[in-house]
Amino acid sequence: MADLTSVLTTMVPLQTTDVSLVVMAVLPLVAIAVLMVGLYQPATITMPIAWLLAIAVGFIGWNMSPELIAAASIAGVFTATEILWIVFGAILLLFTLKQSGAFDVINAGFSSISDDRRVQVVLLVFLMGSFIEGAAGFGTPAAIVGPLLVGLGFPPMAAVVVALTGNIMAITFGAVGTPLIIGLEEVFVQNQQINELIQAQGLTVTEYVADIAVWAASIHAIVGIILPFIGVAMMTRFFGEQRSIRPALEVLPLTLYAWASFAIPYWLTAYFLGPTFPGLLGAMIGLFITAATLRAGYLLPDDEWDFGPRETWPSHWVGDIEPGESVSDEETTVAADGGTVAARHDHDMSLGMAWAPYILTAALLVVTRIWSPLQDFLQQNLVLAWNDIFGTGLSGAFATLYLPGAIFVFVGILTYFLHGMDTSEFSAAWKETGQKILPAVIALWFAVATVQVMINSGQAGDLDSMLVILSDLTANIAGSIYPFFASLVGAFGAFIAGSNTVSDILFGTFQFNAAQNLGVPTAVIVGAQAVGGAIGNLVAIHNVVAALAVVGLVGEEGRVIRLELIPLAYYATATGILTLIFAYVVAPAAF
């Protein structure tokens, strides 16, 4: 194997490709980019249009039959519904805890440790935000942590910027592994060519995706060493009275300690348990260790750091909500009967009781994944499946009980009794969850259906599928240096789709084929894709808008995105370099 220097100077020759096929294959992706990024159209409009374009391209350019198009679309709906079930359960549990007052208790527990804003960023943004991402995913952390920070007295603009920055490491694994399990494993299982290549290595698709999880966790564990510091430095540099990173340097030992407390169990979990629990268990353990250390009086800064006087803040830092107000205290939620009910804030609840639902969730998730008899029971019962759809060989399945959504819903119901909630509060949580999930239904159904049409277009004749043609061309143009750009492809997917899971669905197959074409380890490149999806969430328009909306600052998206380009540039560059090293130096012979 040539050394890295010689590899980087070797370019794969550009192969002849039918230009018209390339133009047609890229049309659905261009439509998504133009409509969502250029014209700010919502996914509910963009994704159906992309699906129609994919159908037209598949029918005209690839001679796909109506049966194959319909079967691919239906298989996509099955996969999307799995995602929606997980998201529904995760959001339901989250809103149930908001209604019961548990989140106020958890927030108060953190704020009691220290009034220093730098310490609060480490605890609430890096660790608590990562925990929420591991439990709920899908942009939830910024929408939850941002209001908590505002309630503590942060300028809303600062709250949004740091809330978006802090949980990159957990985003790759999302809600209990959804981006890798649904975004990669489910897609690879349905792709006959990739499935056969993986099996030829003596691996199942599940085992292969577990390898991807280890590579992704390894990249994050190394690149993320300064992630907590970046969050603090962004705050002190752009929102501090002195506009300097020196106050951040004063808590560098704390940020490194928090990183280690999270990263070590995070990586070990990815290695031994696969993609389901790294974010969840890493953040939970890191929270416990770091909070206990601070409560014991260690690593606390000598002087407390705070923002300058309120009257000195620029007007764009604050919108409709004044810092120091609990955002959730002002909320009223539509109840099931059409009236309103205010979220309860029961500060008599113990911290242990407030955390109990999430601890129970983590325990149940572990048990259902490692205890074979229970795992088999859940996988074999209440499964909705359609095999050999319209005689095409494609299939779809929905394991209602085994998917994490069922555990979230179960724990949500238990929380009603554990926290002594009344019916109006519990009904309000379900109502709010329904309102939150409904817009995602159309967007995800059509997004995943689009990808399945593109993936299965190669079954219609002698042509490679749309995504294979695009990945071959991209790899040939970039040459051997393509691994450096792999994470940026994933970041672009998350930027346009607002979801790491959808990015993996869009580009996981693309990345696998590009790696095959170049002869580099596929698991490393797809791992970089999974990391890239997390990077793109920093500037994903959906996430930014949602985070600004909950703190009353809608309209400031441009300012936030410009600031988030700083951590994005660091993370993408460091990930690209590390991916090159992994692919050509550390594991050049890996699959």
Image (tube, grey):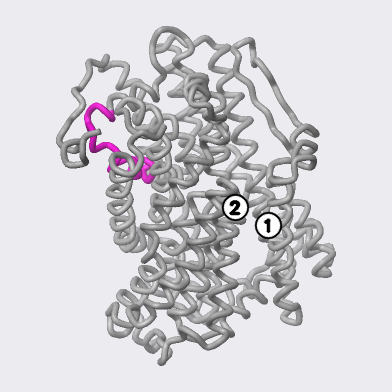
**What amino acid type should be assigned to the residue bearing mark 1?**
Ala
Query: How far across and down, in percent of the image, does residue 46 sit?
Result: 46, 36
What residue lies at 47% left-to-right and 54% top-to-bottom?
543
Query: How far across and down, in percent of the image, does residue 309 sit?
Result: 39, 89
What residue lies at 29% left-to-right and 46% top-to-bottom?
581
**Quarter of the figure that contains the C terminus:** top left
Give the mark, 2 or 1, whose residue is nearer the N terminus.
2
What residue lies at 49% left-to-right and 72% top-to-bottom?
320
Span highlighted in magenta in the image = 474-492
Residue 478, magenta (yes or no)? yes
Q: Which residue does the numbered mark 1 point to in the structure image?
A: 362
State the image quarter where residue 401 is shown: top right
State the image quarter where residue 492 is shown: top left
State the residue in front, 459 or 512: 512
Q: What element carries label 2?
A: loop
Q: Is residue 181 left or right of residue 498?
A: right
State the residue in front, 359 or 3: 3
**What amino acid type should be assigned to the residue bearing mark 2?**
Phe
Is 250 rendered above or below residue 51? Answer: below
Q: Which residue does the numbered mark 2 point to in the structure image?
A: 277
State the residue in front, 308 or 12: 12
